[in-house]
Image (tube, helix red, strand yellow):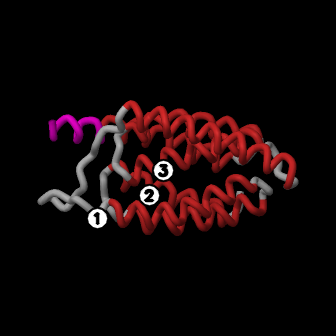
Amino acid sequence: MTPLEIIAAALGITSVWLTVRQNPLCWPIGLVMVLLYAWFFFDARLFSLVLLHGVFAAMQLYGWWQWRQGVYDNGRRPVSDAGRGEILIGLGAALLVGLALGLAMDRLTEAVYPWPDALLTAFSLLAQLWMALKRWQCWLLWIVIDVLYVGFFAFQEYWLTAGLYGVFTALAMLGLREWRAARSSLA
């Protein structure tokens, strides 16, 4: 456990908690967190996760901008539904990207565990996109991803990061409840 991992984990919990609460400060705090984790994963040779966190950095900026668009009088963008087509296309695209990235990481790098790393990366990007668009279904996907990451990091004995993803799982369950309630209150 390094100081870098401890700081990144603390910022991660703060960022996700603020996201659950629909507070736009989640985005700049999340930006710092993903940059620190990119550094951590580079040292661990989890190169798909480095790429993921690089893209997450851009997604933090996109999410921050997106949450400022179409806001209601309360200053918040409303939570919305992802339609069936959006869900199917998103999941299919994430699978294809994950397989392509896994193949590239397996053949072109010295990445450890290129396939699970790549697939979790691709589906995390989809979940992050849906979060930026305030689709409540992002939390369903995050729950699955976070549980899988707990096992992935525990297997590698990255205990603090595995624990962090356990906390993320609990926060994703809370986010699912809160965002669905927010969606229902608009209907």
Q: Which residue is mark 1?
A: 68
Q: Nearer the viewer, residue 173 or 127?
A: 127
Is residue 111 inside the magenta stretch? no
Q: Earlier in the sequence, mark 1 or mark 3?
A: 1
Q: Amino acid at mark 2?
A: Thr
CA–CA distance in space, label 2 to label 1: 20 Å
Q: Which residue is mark 3?
A: 128
Quadrant (top left/top right/bottom left/bottom right) for the N terminus: bottom right
Mark identifier at residue 14 = 2
Relative image position of residue 139 (x, y in whole percent): 42, 39
- Left or right of residue 178, residue 126 in this image: right
Relative image position of residue 147 (x, y in whole percent): 58, 34
CA–CA distance in space, label 1 to label 3: 16 Å
Could you tell me which residue is drawn at 34 percent across and 61 percent down? 66
Q: Amino acid at mark 3?
A: Gln
Q: Amino acid at mark 1?
A: Arg
Could you tell me which residue is drawn at 64 percent across and 49 percent down? 161
- Left or right of residue 95, residue 20 in this image: left
CA–CA distance in space, label 3 to label 2: 16 Å
Could you tell me which residue is drawn at 52 percent across and 65 percent down? 58
Quadrant (top left/top right/bottom left/bottom right) for the C terminus: top left
**Residue 170 drawn above or below residue 134:** above
Highlighted range, magenta: 178-187
